[in-house]
Image (tube, helix red, strand yellow):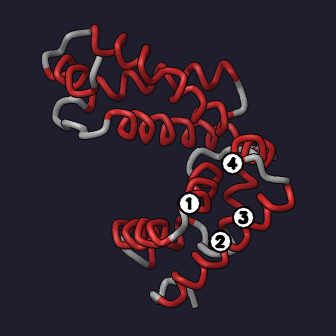
Amino acid sequence: MEDKEIVRLYWDRNERAIKETSVKYGRYCYQIAFNILLSKEDADESVNDTWLKTWECIPPHFPEVLATFVGKITRRISLNKWHLKTRIKRGGGQVSLALEELEECISDSNDVEKSVEHKELLRLINTFLGTLPETERDLFVCRYWFFASIQELCEKFSFSESKTKSMLFRTREKLRKCLEKEGYLS
């Protein structure tokens, strides 16, 4: 079923919309949630929460790209769940590692949100990503949006661990320089 048809089911308040979304994007959303939470049960719960949140958000929203829409919802729900689980004990996992890596070029999210408008920072990062070669951009997005492990990236892109880490480091450095040039970092 096409995305526009699925969205139309949501607008018509037809519960079949959830089933169709689950069939088409269930594995995609599960992978996002699992990469963040590293727990089958928590990932399943996040995906189920995604369907509820999608039901609540459509209408009034009419997403152009349903995959992106449900992916963002899954990511947000999973990160919130991750923050709750790690509030007391700060642990490992890909989320911690990925966020630590990004700290080199972006200060923690609270400082960023206090010092710049969130939308302007997103625009700048999207513009930066648009300047990267496709493979470099895909590698960066897989690591820092989907929280894929280094090992998963090595397998997906057929790179050695050393090359993968090196490419990510160079891209973070480029991002840091871009942010400094725009006045976001001192």
Do tag 3 and tag 2 residues touch (Cβ < 8 Å)? Answer: yes
Mark 4: give few (<14), some (14-19) or many (20+) Cα within 10 Å: many
The residue under the point 67% across, 69% down is 103
- Spatial CA distance of label 4 from label 3 is 10 Å
The residue under the point 72% across, 62% down is 100
Identify the mark at residue 137; answer none if there is no mark.
1
Q: Quadrant of the N terminus?
A: top left
Among numbered discs 4 and 1, the one appearing first in the sequence: 4
Residue 6 visible to the viewer: yes
Residue 3 is situated, as x and y percent measured from the top left of the image, at: 27, 26
Q: Nearer the viewer, mark 4 or mark 2?
A: 2
Q: Quadrant of the C terminus?
A: bottom right
Among numbered discs 3 and 2, the one appearing first in the sequence: 3
Residue 90 visible to the viewer: no
Q: Amino acid type of disc 1?
A: Arg
Among numbered discs 4 and 2, the one appearing first in the sequence: 4
Residue that mark 4 sits on: 95
Mark 2: give few (<14), some (14-19) or many (20+) Cα within 10 Å: some
Q: Is residue 54 above or below residue 122?
A: above
Residue 45 is situated, as x and y percent measured from the top left of the image, at: 55, 21
Residue at the farthest left position: 12
- Spatial CA distance of label 2 from label 1 is 11 Å
The residue under the point 35% across, 72% down is 120
Q: Nearer the viewer, residue 84 or 63?
A: 63
Mark 3: give few (<14), some (14-19) or many (20+) Cα within 10 Å: some
Identify the mark at residue 101; answer none if there is no mark.
3
Residue that mark 2 sits on: 172
Mark 1: give few (<14), some (14-19) or many (20+) Cα within 10 Å: some
- Residue 7 in the figure: left or right of residue 37: left
- Spatial CA distance of label 4 from label 2 is 16 Å
Q: Amino acid type of disc 3?
A: Glu
Secondary structure of residue under mark 4? helix
